[in-house]
Image (tube, grey):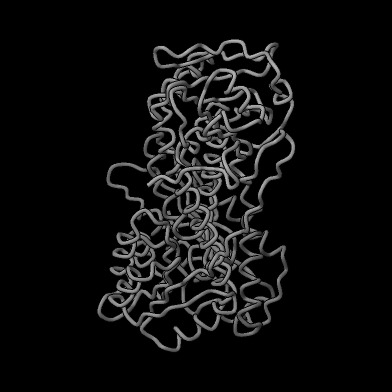
Amino acid sequence: METPISPDRGPGILNLVDGTSLLGLRESTPMVSPQPVTPAPLILIADDESPMRHLLRQTLEKDGYQLVEATNGAECLTLFRDLRPDMVLLDAVMPVLDGFSCCAQLRAAAGRREVPLLMITGLDDAESVEEAFQAGATDYITKPIHWAVLRQRVARLLMASRAMEELRQRSERERRLIQITARIRRSLDQQEILRTAVEEIQALLEAEQVAVCELEGGTPQFIVESSLQGWPTLGDVAGPYPWRELATLQPAPGDWTWICPDSQQTSDWYGLFLAQHQIHAGVAVPIIPNDRVWGLLCVHQYSAPRTWSAADVGILQQVTLQLAGGLQQAQIYAQLETANAELLRLVAVDGLTQVANRRRFDEYLHQEWRRAGRTEEALSLILADIDWFKHYNDTYGHIAGDDCLRRVAQAIQRAVKRPADLVARYGGEEFAVILPQTGLVGAMTVAEQIRQAIAALELPHAGAPQTTIVSLSLGVASLHPAPGVQMADLVKRADQALYQAKQEGRNRVAVVC
């Protein structure tokens, strides 16, 4: 049942925002609503190993998250449906229901909710990674877990998910508003827009009169009206009312709404106006494009007093926002695009090295292979591996090893010049570079530049058997897509070339023709 809007201290004109009597235009002050307390995100951990669940809980509780645990995939599904968590950390290998099958069912159960599903797995082969994303995983992280990376990944995925969900809800509300005001939005002609607005509102609210009063440009007047037969036309409203003063004020949309359930019992400016025209009940909502009051959207009842409901007034306020140019809609679209771009970046970038991850590599290689097939141009691939990296970790520790990976990745990125070339972390200490529209000679040149760039870093490597600094071995392959030639052949050749470079002594570029 709709809630009527009525004065707290007898009949009168109300400011809808603060609920105080409007005896003047400048007396009311906006009511500040307390900010709602946002509960800590709830994360569901699904792993059959108790020590791993304990470590995950211990790590994430430090960041203030709520945690709930499942010991297998089936239990995870049940808790997901019952508790509706904000995020799921999911092991790939579990009893009863494996992580990949569970992930697919979780994604289906989530429906339109953008719930991040982060796979935690010891499987880092291409097939497992591809299977995880095909099952609906948002991202994945491999064991042994780098805890700082995990915390950052969780925080960023939750932030992106929260933004997407908020924008989805706002977009849904805006979608309903757009349906109601579809006729208004189809026209660019001011008079037609206003005519459509008053006609739609009159039919929707079953009002006896709906009119728009323009306050700018000379004498204020009602320029568009829609009235039931028999009721007078308002026309020029010049008189002892502060119309001109209204035009100089700068409220935010929705700040001021004048509501009069019975004009004969009020003495305010709007009540006096209604009384002069023998209007028993009225509502006036400012139309505010460009932060200034352009006019008023008014709804009048002549035959008898009428109590305006909150829904009535809400519709009017929404329509005035549409009449003011749909600025909020444009902002929502911009925010949605930003959130989409950020989410795509998060799922395409390797968290440690900040170059493209394996998923993005696979997508881009498929894309460029198809493009090369259409344009009949060469596509080249470089696979590179840090020499003696296990020895590096054994000598300096994994933290130093992570720093080494970051510095090598960024050096490769700087050495690759063209925007169309993609640098990706292929797995572990291995990197890949996709070179569209590049033949074998050009790819070998780029590979050598990369090798020299890593050597120029002069990162000490005391644990290496054959060198004193960090170096790269690189394998290069180039193919023209043609019948009988598969994309996998390109990857296979590059891998064979990388193996050859290692066999020949490392710190070199090799090619398999």
Q: Nearer the viewer, residue 339 or 275?
A: 275
Q: Nearer the viewer, residue 68 or 399?
A: 68
Q: Relative to 419, does residue 453 appear above or below in the rendering? A: below
Q: Relative to 31, does residue 137 appear above or below in the rendering? A: below
Residue 134, image quadrant: bottom left
Q: Return the residue found at the far front.
A: 265
Q: Residue at x 36, y 64 (%)?
A: 132
The number of callouts visible is: 0
Residue 459 shown left or right of residue 112 in the figure: right
Q: Position of residue 278 (x, y in %)?
A: 53, 20
Q: Return the residue found at the far left.
A: 96
Q: Is residue 510 visible?
A: no
Q: Is residue 56 visible?
A: yes
Q: Position of residue 451 (x, y in %)?
A: 62, 60
Q: Residue at x 41, y 27 (%)?
A: 182
Q: Position of residue 180 (x, y in %)?
A: 40, 31
Residue 462, image quadrant: bottom right
Q: Residue at x 37, y 53 (%)?
A: 112
Q: Position of residue 133 (x, y in %)?
A: 37, 60
Q: Nearer the viewer, residue 312 or 269?
A: 269
Q: Nearer the viewer, residue 338 or 130?
A: 338
Residue 410 shown left or right of residue 262 in the figure: right
Q: Residue at x 36, y 51 (%)?
A: 487
Residue 265, image quadrant: top right
